[in-house]
Image: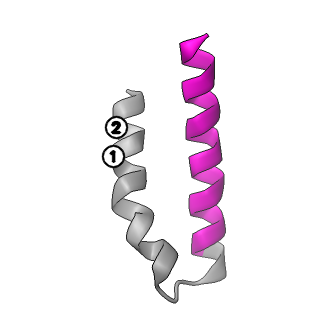
Amino acid sequence: MPTVHRQLLARCRPLDGTPAIPAQRKARREYENRVNTLMADIQR
């Protein structure tokens, strides 16, 4: 399932360069951090 999360993050990436609401950017960053942690735990 981690691939699904990576695909979702890739689709959200365009928000980084646009004037998005700060809460949206924060939510995306937090989600990305969780996915990265999940990936690190899986690779161990």
Q: Residue furthest bottom?
A: 19
**Within the image, what quadrant is residue 41 found in?**
top right
Are there few (<14), some (14-19), or many (20+) residues within 10 Å of tag 1?
few
Q: Which residues are magenta?
A: 24-44
- Residue 18's mark? none
Q: CA distance from mark 2 to mark 1?
A: 5 Å
Residue 15 lies, in percent from the top left, at 45, 74
Instruction: Confirm whether the magenta stretch covers residue 33.
Output: yes
Q: Amino acid at mark 2?
A: Val
Report the residue at 46% width, 85% height from top: 18
Residue 42 lies, in percent from the top left, at 55, 16
Q: Residue furthest top?
A: 44
- Residue 4's mark? 2
**Would you say 20 lies left or right of 4 here?**
right
Residue 10 lies, in percent from the top left, at 37, 55
State the colouring used for the structure image: one colour
Instruction: Confirm whether the magenta stretch covers residue 43.
Output: yes
**Residues at circles 2 and 1 in contact by the CB criterion of under 8 Å:** yes
42 lies above or below 28: above
Q: Amino acid at mark 1?
A: Gln
16 lies above or below 31: below
Q: Which residue is tagged 1?
A: 7
Q: Nearer the viewer, residue 39 or 27?
A: 39
- Circle 2: element type: helix
**Would you say 28 lies left or right of 26 here?**
left
Report the residue at 65% width, 75% height from top: 23
- Circle 1: element type: helix
**Within the image, what quadrant is residue 26 found in?**
bottom right
**Within the image, what quadrant is residue 39 found in?**
top right
